[in-house]
Amino acid sequence: MKLDEIKISRAIIKSYNEKILSALDVDVAIAGAGPAGMCCGYYLAKSGKRIAIFERRLSVGGGMWGGGIMFNEIVVQEKAKKILDEFGIRTKRYDKGYYLADSIEAVSTICAKTVKTGVKIFNLLSAEDVMIRRKRICGLVLNWTAVEMANLHVDPIAMKAKFVVDATGHAAEVVHVAERKSGIRLKTKTGKIMGEKSMWADLAEDMIVKNSREVCPGLYVCGMCANAVFGAPRMGPIFGGMLLSGKKVAEQINKAL
């Protein structure tokens, strides 16, 4: 068979157009395809919800790829191991309550299983703004990451969702935009983003699950974003809280829907 470059190009453009068009009106839009964001999308899609995840980088997985200090091993605690078991990710016991997993296997498996549940993941797309109606977050404003990096004056597109999840990690990008532009008071002690504190794994792992919740009408936070917004410590290269956080937000949104 002789390959036709134009046919290849048409196939890519047509298929992508269909995919992005189907993602312009969904049940839940998630900004950030790290472990928390993908885990949240996975559990929502398993319950039949229409989910789109927008990731500004070329690759998904956030900081999980690098494990700790670029040693591609991650640690999870007992209660989070069950989630890795569900995904079919191999673990080995290091000590009582401590389990190791290969970070490459973990990210690639979580991503594959999440996509296969029906979640649409779009990389190289940044959430540069939010849609707000009647003081409720109801969608995202999207642009190509390359446009943002080149500082080009190119207008974005919008998509709507019944709920939005900020899973952008330490930066809490969506919540920052909502706080700055909406005039909405956040459900934190100060009404504003409180900022993350220095590393304290034991406290942070509990707090990240506690803080994974609605931060203002229509907008939820999960993953490290939750601790950054509510002023809790970071946890370092233990990833159990990330997985539990994403699952918790999925359960909360499922109830709300």
Image (tube, helix red, strand yellow):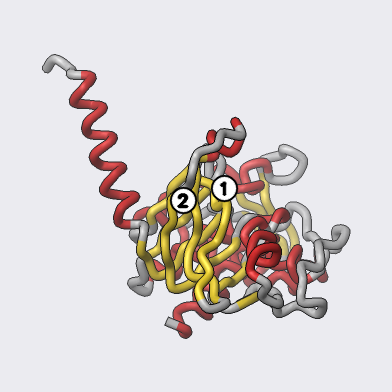
Tally of marks: 2
Q: Is residue 206 above or below residue 13?
A: below
Q: Residue at x 75, y 73 (%)?
A: 207
| Image quarter of the C terminus | bottom left
Q: Residue at x 35, y 55 (%)?
A: 116
Rendered image: mark on residue 153: none
Q: Picture coordinates of residue 67 (x, y %)?
A: 69, 45
**Which residue of the protein is positioned furthest toward the left in this rendering?**
1
Task: Note whether residue 105 is visible.
Answer: no
Label 2: how many Cα within 10 Å (few below 14, some 14–19, many 20+): many
Q: Picture coordinates of residue 18 (x, y %)?
A: 26, 48
Q: Give the mark nearest the N terminus, 2 or 1.
A: 1
Q: Residue at x 75, y 63 (%)?
A: 228
Q: Nearer the viewer, residue 21 or 62?
A: 21
Q: Residue at x 62, y 60 (%)?
A: 174
Identify residue type, mark 1: Gly
**Which residue of the protein is positioned furthest toward the top in this rendering?**
2
Q: Quadrant of residue 235?
A: bottom right
The residue where tag 2 is placed is 111
Label 1: how many Cα within 10 Å (few below 14, some 14–19, many 20+): many
Q: Picture coordinates of residue 236 (x, y %)?
A: 78, 54
Q: Nearer the viewer, residue 84 or 46?
A: 46
Q: Is residue 151 above or below residue 139?
A: above
Q: Are marks 2 and 1 in contact (CB under 8 Å)?
A: yes
The residue where tag 1 is placed is 61
Q: Picture coordinates of residue 249 (x, y %)?
A: 56, 73
Q: Nearer the viewer, residue 243 or 62?
A: 62
Left or right placement of residue 256 versus residue 77 in this view: left
